[in-house]
Amino acid sequence: MSRDFAVVLNRVSPIPLYHQLSGQLVTAIESGTLPKGSFLDNEIELAERWQVSRPTVRRAIQDLVDNGMLVRRRGVGTQVVSDQVRRPFKLSSLFEDLLASGRQPVTKVLVLDTVAADGEVAEALGVAPATAVVHIERLRSVGSQPLAIMRNWLTTEVAGSVSADELELRGLYALLRERGVRPHSAVQTLGAAAATSTDAAALGIAAGAPLVTMRRVMQDDTGRPVELGHHVYDAAHYTVELHVVDTA
């Protein structure tokens, strides 16, 4: 099946070849070029076809095995098993997690406005009701595949002069760090919901389709609450990964 998948590598780029290759494999899986259930050719054939070393191919494939998109089956080969984004449960932005896994995040800013804090926002951010706060709403995609709608509320002190152009090119937490705000801890609540007609239209799915939901209240390293987030993710393309350790 991977004979139908061509790669284009920039051999003078500072980005390692294995990372370029793993990113293009992810894109091929998510676009359906390498559909779930298909098999890759063996590493020797792939290395010859793509004109790279066998260790480069092996490391690129291992990245996707570690991310749950490929599985190695003894005596059978390497198979595509998932086209979902698998995200670790940690304090990080979706933008950063997508980049780290070799995917290309695309952001469209839907709302960037100053609004009066309602009761929930005021309580989460530790401000009085009706205090002016910054409301941000973004559509995050992986390539051309819509993945999540992210709604955030921040104090005006924290948000500063953040612009729509910046939000389309960078992750929110990276922008906060540049402004001296250091995300430190958060309370996150995961849930599930049926897509409203508005969210369904933005995500390109049917109304009532399943969504993964996340509510997050984040504090910086001084202990002050600085962000309330309400995010929804297309459950067909997104899972959360938890690492559980027996401490008994």
Image: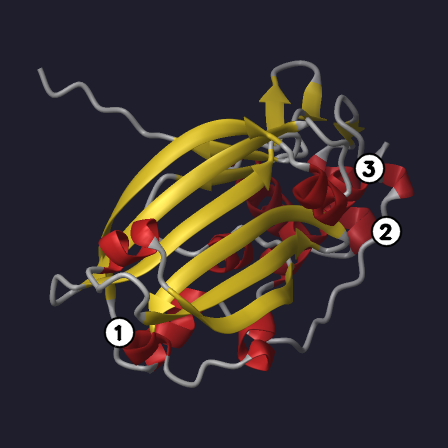
| Residue 15 is at least partly visible in this image | no
Name the spot of residue 129 as percent of width and height, x first: 27, 61
- Label 3 is placed on what type of residue? Gly
Q: To which residue does mark 2 refer?
A: 6
Q: Residues within 10 Å of mark 1 (few under 14, many from 20)?
A: some
Q: Quadrant of the C terminus?
A: top left
Q: CA distance from mark 1 to mark 3?
A: 40 Å
Q: CA distance from mark 2 to mark 1?
A: 42 Å
Q: How many marks?
A: 3
Q: Residues within 10 Å of mark 2 (few under 14, many from 20)?
A: few
Q: To which residue does mark 1 refer?
A: 181
Name the spot of residue 11 as percent of width and height, x first: 70, 72
State the residue in front, 188 or 239. 188
In the figure, is residue 164 to the left or right of 34?
Answer: left
Name the spot of residue 2 as percent of width and height, x first: 83, 37
**Whether label 1 touches label 3, CB < 8 Å:** no
Q: Residue at x 88, y 39 (%)?
A: 3
Q: To which residue does mark 3 refer?
A: 32
